[in-house]
């Protein structure tokens, strides 16, 4: 039997290309060489890195989703004048010579202009439907199957809304929500957790018990109870979730602060007379940053999971907010008649969450390369 | 060891009181309670649109008689401290009030549903531990081989995708599309007329998809945990020493590394009790399995608050018991555990 011990992947070969030299951005400002090393290590883990690139691109695109997926036209040229209806107030139909005062139906207008052939034109976004528009075909009941002709690339849901549009806007809302949760949970977690680990004593003991008790209640169920009584909007739902979600980061921060506090460099700082704020702010927290950062992707995944589950059960964001969970619920109701709904949303969630987890895995690896000795 | 257990059990008391206070606070949310009243006043003062969506989401509104029952059971007319202790007294003798939907005692309503959840819980437990411990060990020994990489990819997908999405996708593909399995339910409609073997087959065919969904999440977590901790232990000096001294590799694994590798798994073992008893209401809802979880969901939709709060109390207490069980398990497999001195290892 061989007992060769080999360092597993990412033995520093990836980052060992150049000697550790701080890369200079400007005179007097250097990036921490450790950070450079971590970034290189992260980039060397291909699936995590490419997932990160893909997700960032998707997030940027979804931030401008109004330009890509919208019932409003991008540009309308009417009688020699250009209109840009995407952002801003609605433009009533009579602006373009129609006989109604509600918002212009741009798809209709486009067909009309084409027919008239008077040099007027309409440029529609690639997906010419908004997430809240019901596009009904007279005589047929939705959901309609995917079709390239109608522009419903993934079909419509049970009220004739475009599935792709709802997916993309739902993606944006889910991520915005997950980031908001992350921010609040981490602010509380870092503040309380650091205080617990740093000061210890009665404060620590008290919060330990509080967190233990908090972890005993089934949080998803409690959130459902609360939202069944108070109808939530985006912000109140976030508040309720933070109330039951702050414990995890607090506990992690407490543990890592506790560890760092006893290290020599903190003792040295204290011996030199550094104040508590300085010890925490410039010594403890910077050294726990790897813990904080490596939890971020998993918290994002957790936030998306929570929101989608609540929406699926009908206790999340109120309709008609575009949401993945609501699409899942609709998809299940039409599982035989309209499988495109559940398949498109189910596969989207799977891909996005797998990518987020790839990123998480890569970040963890980059910050804390585990070298396993193993037998061959 | 004995002193450890005594101190551990003493610690239950403050936690129990804390948990019951938290749950009691939540019971103040039910209709007719002070928090609900405050909320509805705020709602009336605020926007009207929120109030109109109020009824569309939930089921029926409660009748006056039902509201009176709720008020009497939770003691809304008494001072908070008095009603807390009265409520606690009722909970301790398992009087959880009366369901407004079935007008049966809540305790009976809940225990009626338990066998179904226990069935799934136990099978999930057997499948999870029965497969993930050997698989994790094999993956650790065969680290970086093709087998390891392929299973890692599958396991990773199972970990990343939430179990209820897995459940929905399975349902779409294998039940709705291929029609290999039924669309849901615990047993088929003609269950009572089947022979014994037919019954077992019927139960089995209904259980396949939910069990896959149940295991998907916990399975990935436990396998990776098992693999990593075994690898950590194999890299540790005591195993290296044992091998260097000429010990058989098998004995080094089973005699030394294995037991220590179980410690991380043991920390989560007690929580299985709540899995066994309560299941997951997401999966029970998707497969329409009439267990504890679906009951919790339906009573919330139907605004059957005594049952909702009963389920909340019971599951919180089960979590509490599960945590204690986990601690006992850890103490049993890890003789190094000492109470109160474990700070640095936390």
Image: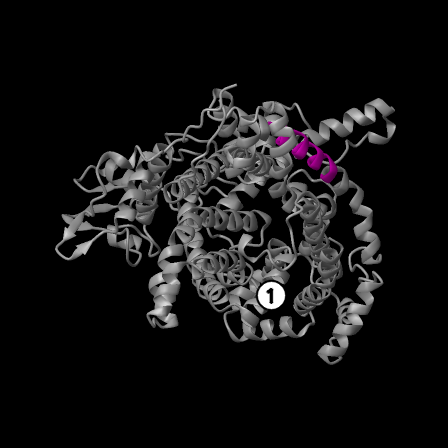
Q: Residue furthest top?
A: A1
Q: Is residue A106 left or right of residue B287?
A: left
Residue that appears at 44% across and 52% down: A178
The answer for which chain carries disc 1 is A
The residue nearer to you, when weighing A121 against B12, is B12
| Span shown in magenta | B121-135
Image coloring type: one colour
SS of the residue under disc 1: helix
The residue nearer to you, when weighing A227 against A89, is A227
Q: Is residue B89 above or below residue A16?
A: below
Q: Quadrant of residue A183?
A: bottom left
Q: Is residue B334 left or right of residue A38?
A: right
Name the spot of residue A279 as percent of width and height, x first: 37, 66
Name the spot of residue A289 as percent of width and height, x first: 38, 54
Q: Is residue A117 left or right of residue A282?
A: left
Residue that appears at 50% across and 32% down: A340
Mark yes or no: residue B70 visible: yes
Magenta-drawn stretch, dominant element (helix, strand or loop): helix
> Label 1: which residue?
A210
């Amino acid at each position: 039997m061989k007992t060769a011990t080999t360092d597993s992947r990412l033995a520093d070969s990836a980052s060992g290309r150049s000697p550790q030299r701080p890369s200079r951005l400007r005179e007097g400002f250097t990036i921490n060489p450790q950070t450079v090393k971590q970034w290189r290590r992260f980039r060397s883990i291909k699936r995590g890195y490419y997932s990160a690139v893909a997700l960032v691109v998707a997030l940027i695109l979804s931030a401008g989703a109004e330009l890509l997926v919208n019932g409003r036209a991008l540009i309308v040229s009417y009688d020699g004048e250009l209109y840009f209806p995407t952002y801003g107030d609605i433009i009533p139909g009579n602006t373009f010579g129609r006989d109604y005062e509600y918002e212009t139906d741009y798809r209709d207008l486009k067909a009309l202009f084409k027919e008239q052939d008077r040099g007027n034109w309409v440029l529609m976004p690639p997906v010419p439907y908004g997430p809240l528009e019901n596009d009904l075909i007279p005589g047929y009941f939705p959901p309609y199957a995917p079709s390239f002709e109608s522009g419903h690339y993934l079909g419509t849901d049970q009220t004739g809304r475009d599935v792709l549009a709802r997916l993309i806007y739902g993606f944006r809302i889910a991520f915005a929500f997950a980031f908001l949760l992350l921010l609040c949970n981490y602010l509380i977690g870092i503040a309380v957790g650091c205080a617990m680990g740093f000061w210890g004593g009665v404060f620590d003991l008290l919060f330990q018990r509080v967190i233990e008790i908090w972890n005993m209640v089934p949080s998803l169920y409690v959130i459902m109870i609360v939202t069944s009584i108070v109808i939530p909007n985006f912000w109140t739902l976030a508040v309720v979730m933070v109330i039951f979600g702050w414990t995890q980061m607090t506990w992690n921060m407490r543990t890592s602060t506790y560890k760092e506090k006893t290290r020599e460099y903190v003792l040295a700082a204290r011996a030199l007379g550094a104040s508590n704020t300085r010890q925490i702010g410039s010594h403890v927290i910077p050294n726990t940053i790897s813990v904080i950062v490596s939890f971020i992707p998993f918290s994002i995944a957790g936030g998306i999971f929570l929101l989608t589950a609540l929406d699926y059960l009908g206790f999340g964001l109120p309709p008609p907010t575009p949401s993945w969970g609501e699409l899942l619920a609709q998809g299940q109701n039409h599982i035989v008649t309209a499988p495109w709904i559940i398949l498109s949303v189910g596969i989207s969630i799977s891909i996005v969450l797998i990518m987020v987890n790839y990123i998480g895995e890569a970040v963890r690896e980059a910050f804390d390369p585990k070298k396993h000795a193993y037998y061959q | 060891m004995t002193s450890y257990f005594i101190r551990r059990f003493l610690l239950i008391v403050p936690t129990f009181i804390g948990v019951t206070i938290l749950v009691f606070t939540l019971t103040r949310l039910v209709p007719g309670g002070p928090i609900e009243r405050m909320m509805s006043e705020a709602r009336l003062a605020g926007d009207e649109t929120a109030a109109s969506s109020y009824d569309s989401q939930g089921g029926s509104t409660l009748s006056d008689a039902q509201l009176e029952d709720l008020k009497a059971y939770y003691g809304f007319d008494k001072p908070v401290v008095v009603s807390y202790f009265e409520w606690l007294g009722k909970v301790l003798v398992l009087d959880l009030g009366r369901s407004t939907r079935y007008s049966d005692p809540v305790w009976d309503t809940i225990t009626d549903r338990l066998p179904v959840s226990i069935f799934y819980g136990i099978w999930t437990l057997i499948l999870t531990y029965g497969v993930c411990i050997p698989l994790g060990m094999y993956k650790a020994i065969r680290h970086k081989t093709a087998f390891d990489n392929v299973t890692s990819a599958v396991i990773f997908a199972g970990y990343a995708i939430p179990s209820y999405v897995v459940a929905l996708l399975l349902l779409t593909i294998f039940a709705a599309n291929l029609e290999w399995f039924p669309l849901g339910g615990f047993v088929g409609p003609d269950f009572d007329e089947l022979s014994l073997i037919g019954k077992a087959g019927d139960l089995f065919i209904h259980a396949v998809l939910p069990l896959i969904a149940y295991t998907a999440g916990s399975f990935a977590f436990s396998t990776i945990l098992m693999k990593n901790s075994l690898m950590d232990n194999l890299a540790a000096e005591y195993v290296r020493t044992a091998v260097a001294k000429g010990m058989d590799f098998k004995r080094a694994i089973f005699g030394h590394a294995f037991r220590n590798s179980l410690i991380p798994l043991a920390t989560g073992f007690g929580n299985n009790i709540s899995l066994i008893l309560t299941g997951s209401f997401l999966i029970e809802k998707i497969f329409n399995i009439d267990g504890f979880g679906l009951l919790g969901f339906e009573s919330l939709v139907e605004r059957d608050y005594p049952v909702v709060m009963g389920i909340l109390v019971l599951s919180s207490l089960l979590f509490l018991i599960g945590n204690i069980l986990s601690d006992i398990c850890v103490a049993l497999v890890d003789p190094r555990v000492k109470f109160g001195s474990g700070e640095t290892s936390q």
